[in-house]
Amino acid sequence: MGEENERQEECNASMDSIKEYGEVELKDQEREHTIQLMTIVGEIEGHDVLPNTTKATKYEHILPKLAQIEEDKKVDGLLLLLNTMGGDVESGLAIAEMVASMSKPSVSLVLGGSHSIGVPLAVSTDYSFIVPTGTMVVHPVRLNGLTIGAKQTYDYFQQIQDRITGFVSDHSNISKKHLEELMLNTGMLAKDLGTVLVGAQTVKEGLIDEVGGIQQALLKLHALIDLNLKK
């Protein structure tokens, strides 16, 4: 009875974690690997609280969890599932930098979409996947359509954009110059600058490593974990 109660408590805790934060531990009995699954969904919330009707990922939840994963000896790797429209630039970039700096092996999987600041999040892991129908929208930094009326504001926006393009090019196979060309494309979006990439196009352009789903992502992560354990 004691073991059954313990398993039931673990199951309840796992369900609460999924419901509250979209997180769960995956345990492979054969390989004896423990993987922390995290989701980045909806809009990435920054310093301003979004309405209750908006599906959001709160960076103040993600950052401490990533630190906990890094320090937890029982966790062998991180699987990051992405379906996000983007959101707060500073918060999204902070999460991406945190993931990129971890010593634990990590793999990302784009499901649905990973747009705007979701792009650096998708490439922040050691290896990245996208499903065939997944999309990524690359566009310049903007502030809710607000007109830039001062040189200082423009320079600040350019600085933010340089940080993003630098991070993405450092963590993927696309050059900063080509990424900026995709950002400033005028022929695809009717009312905006940018480029929409679907599935295999993201691999061709050098943003994502491979087209695949959850099976391929987990197999790759297990392989990276085995390599890390050998080291």
Image: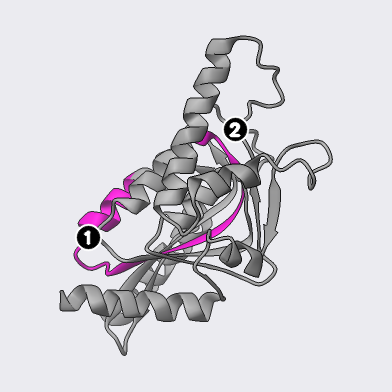
Earlier in the chain: of badge 2 and badge 1, it is: 1
Give the residue drawn at x 66%, y 41%.
Answer: 54
- Residue that label 1 marks: 72
Give the residue drawn at x 44%, y 36%.
Answer: 163
> Residue 90 vs residue 51: left or right?
left
The outermost residue toward the right is: 190
Q: What residue span does the magenta drawing correspond to?
A: 64-89
The outermost residue toward the left is: 231
Q: Is disc 2 in contact with disc 1, using a CB cutoff of under 8 Å?
A: no
Quadrant for the C terminus in the image: bottom left
Give the image quarter of residue 11.
bottom left
Q: Position of residue 193 (x, y in %)?
A: 72, 38
Q: Amino acid at mark 2?
A: Val
- Residue that label 2 marks: 141
Quadrant for the N terminus in the image: bottom left
Q: Which mark is residue 99?
A: none
The outermost residue toward the bottom is: 30
Q: Amino acid at mark 1?
A: Asp
Q: Position of residue 208 (x, y in %)?
A: 52, 63
Q: Position of residue 29 (x, y in %)?
A: 32, 86
> Residue 33 vs residue 174: left or right?
left
Q: Secondary structure at mark 2?
A: loop
Sort mark 1 into few (<14), some (14-19) or many (20+) by Cα contacts within 10 Å: few
